[in-house]
Image: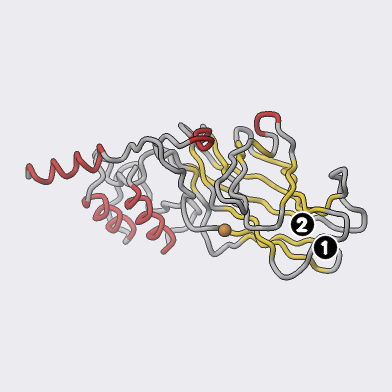
Amino acid sequence: MKVCTIVTLALAAGTAAADTNPRMGGPMKHIMVHLHGNHLHCHVDESISTPILRDYDESYTGAASVLDGQRYNAQYGWMVDGVWVPPEGSTLRIRQVDATPGIRVYSGRSLAGMSPFSPIFGTAESSDSIEWSGTMLHNWYSVEQTGNFSVTCLVYFADAQGNPLPGYEPGSATLTWSTSDRCGADFDRDGFVDFFDLDAFVACFDGGFCPTGVNPDVNADGFVDFFDFDAFLQIFESGC
Ligand SMILES: [Cu+2]
C-alpha cells in the first residue's frame, strides 16, 4: 500500500496554506430583520445548523490576519427583510448587549467588497454598537478556547447621537456557536485525512462503530441528522 501512503502524506502536507482568504465556515445563516409598525423584529434562519468556530491552521492576507491562530466563523449575516427604511433622521444600529467571555468580533464585508476586519462590539476596546447600512453583513466571530459561545444583539433606530429613537421597539437576536477541538476531517483519528475517514464517518453516522472520543453529531447541535452529513462532507473537502 505504498501508493496510498504517499497520497495520504500529500493530502496532509497540503492542508496548511499560507496567505489565503478566510472561510465563512459553512452556508450563510441569516438574521432577517423586519419592521412591524414601530417594532423591529429579528428572525434567525434555523434551517441552517449551529455554526462551528474552527481553526483551519492557515495564515490570512492583510487585515484578515487577525483571524490567524483563531477559531472563527462568519456564517451569521444580518439582512433586511421586506421593504422599509429607517424613520427620517435616524440610522439602523446593532448593539451587542451580551456575549460569552473570550469572543471577538471583526467587521464583515461592506458593499464595497473586502471585509475591513475592524474590531467591533467591544473587541479591542471598540464601541459596543455599529451603524448598519442594511445591506447583507457577515461579521467575523473568533475565539481561542473551545466551548459553546453566544452573543445577543439589539437592532434599533438611532438618532444622530446614536441613542435609540423614542417610540420604536428594538429587535433582539441571539447567535450561537460551538467549537471543534480537533481536525474534524480526520474522523478515524489516525493522523491522516483520507477516504478511510469518509468510511468511518458513514459507519458511525449509520449507528455502527464510532472511533473513541468521536461522535456523529459533527455540527454539535445535539442531533444526528442530515445536517451532520453535510457538515462532515464540507469539513472533509476543506481538509484541516
Ligand atoms: Cu448572507
The answer to whether residue 219 is above or below residue 66 is below
Could you tell me residue 181's position as x and y percent?
42, 38
Q: How many labels does the image show?
A: 2
Instruction: Decide which of tag 1 and tag 2 comes sooner along the chain.
Output: 1
Residue shown at 50% from the left, 35% from the top: 62
| Quadrant of the frame with the C terminus | top left
Question: Residue furthest toward the right?
Answer: 166
Q: Mark 1 belongs to which amino acid?
A: His
Q: Mark 2 belongs to which amino acid?
A: Gly
Callout 1: CB less than 8 Å from ligand 1: no
At mark 2, the secondary structure is strand
How far, Cα to Cα, is label 1 from label 2? Answer: 7 Å
Whether tag 1 and tag 2 are in contact, CB under 8 A, the answer is yes
Mark number for residue 115?
A: none
Locate residue 54: give its quadrant.
top left
Locate residue 82: give its quadrant.
bottom right
**What residue did someone put label 2 on?**
171
